[in-house]
Amino acid sequence: MPRKKTLHKKPEKKTRAKKAATLTTPRGMRDLLHNEYFTYQGFFEKAADIALYYGFQPIETPILEKEEVFARSVGEETDIVAKEMYAFSTKGRDRVALRPEGTAGIMRSYIEHGMLSLPQPVMLYYHGPFFRHERPQHGRARQFWQFGFEMFGTDQSVADALTIKLTHLILEEVGIKNLCVLINSIGDDQCRPAYIKELVAYYRKHINKLCTHCRKRLRVNPLRLLDCKNKHCADFKKDAPEIVGFLCEPCKRHLKEVLEYLDTMEIAYQIDHTLARGLDYYTRTVFEIVSQVEKNEVNENKDAESSDSDTQKDQGADKKTDQKEAVEEESLSLGGGGRYDNLARALGSKRDIPAVGAAIGVDRVTKAPGFSAPTPRVVKRPKVYFIQVGAGAKFKSFEVIEALRMARIPIAHSISKDTLSAQLGMAEKAKIPHIIILGQKEANEDAVIVRNMTTRSQETVPIAKIGEYFKKH
Ligand SMILES: [Zn+2]
Ligand SMILES: [Zn+2]
């Protein structure tokens, strides 16, 4: 029976599908809506709060920068700049790019505004959207959100330690468990060249088995050989020469000091010899913070230990076990950063500006196991449902809403509705403790009716005294 109609419907469906396709976000980008907006907002507020207590100040740079800011700093040969950057010419033929990361723009700002003349270190935090033209089927968004911070004008290891501590602390404070810092040093101009030589010699022996990217990396940026996610290339990683043996004295001391700070702060870390990070501008310390999912064995022990407290949460525990099995042995990288003493010169600074920074991937963190969203300050739970009845009352509505705002009483309403019953119905559904009714009579008397929804008692209150009334009740 239903088949009969399909002939008629088909063309209509097609146009509808076409229409729908144009009315969507660009591929790999999405809207932040409803509760998810507040989740992000809550995270940004929490992270900013912690950063402020640790002495950082906010900064916001343009989403668009001159293309060369990233080409010179991130590196022309990196995937980010060569393949993934949204770069284009404006009508005035300037080459610009949507920022693929935060550090380069902030260093540009530091140099442009002469922040070198301020007391050092200059400590800044930022958050917002970033853009990379990646393939969405790999689960990566083309617009993503980061929270990051930078310390400019210091080469001291304590700055690296503070950066790691802050990243770790923010993740911890939003509930992420089993955090571990993966850390490495990639040396500096003094010691890295000798290591690179050795690394290239090692990989050259296996050149025929390397992926095409790695063959190119061998020529243009050998350190990135260690970053390759290709299975065949990963096999060569474990026998690759380790940079630790090549570090010069100052680099060695720097790494040792950073690790001592981590020990003192009791932050769990692992030295990861293959950690190089994807960007050209790093020197010395590079790190990533991962949330490690424990192996089954460890889980069982832990569950046994804490079984008493867990008996009431049986259902939740079951769910957790499922999750654990699904992502067993995976570790989720949630943030990272490092030192970048050469970035300023790459951007054209006449002076050295040693610096260190980190960024947190907010999209991943908000989906990570254990994450609990802090409630943002902007969220206001309505204490009052405001109802107006009659044309005169509607005109006076704004006065009442403003009186309530001045008294800091959050409200809900449906100002476009006219009838009492429609508005009462919505107030009941919303389960808000009080309603305020403004009828024609009340409007004439500059008053409102305040009804307590629990006790059903009500009272007429002058608009001018609304604040006072709610303070008492
Ligand atoms: Zn490879
Ligand atoms: Zn060195």
Image: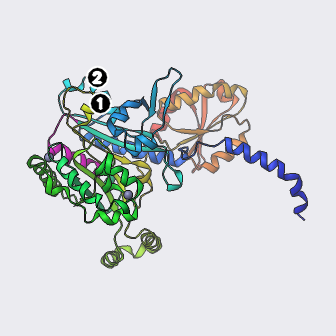
Q: Is residue 67 visible?
A: yes
Element carrying mark 2: loop
**Looking at the image, which is closer to me, 169 or 378?**
169
In 3D space, how far apart are the residues under numbered discs 1 and 2 (Cα atoms)?
14 Å
For label 2, the residue is: 113
Looking at the image, the residue that sits furthest to the left is: 249
Answer with the quarter of the image where residue 308 lies.
bottom left
> Residue 126, how many percent across, how many down?
35, 37
Q: Quadrant of the N terminus?
A: bottom right
Element carrying mark 1: loop
Q: Residues within 10 Å of mark 2 (few under 14, many from 20)?
A: few
Residue 164 falls left or right of residue 233: left
Report the disc number at residue 347.
1
**Looking at the image, which is closer to me, 39 or 188?**
188
**Looking at the image, which is closer to me, 187 or 173?**
187
Amino acid bearing label 2: His
**Looking at the image, which is closer to me, 299 or 466?**
299
1 or 2: tag closer to the N-terminus: 2
Magenta span covers which residues?
152-169
Q: Residues within 10 Å of mark 1 (few under 14, many from 20)?
A: some
Q: How many marks can you see?
A: 2
Residue 176 falls left or right of residue 158: right
Amino acid bearing label 1: Leu
> Residue 12, how many percent across, how many down?
82, 48
> Residue 457, how many percent across, how many down?
59, 45
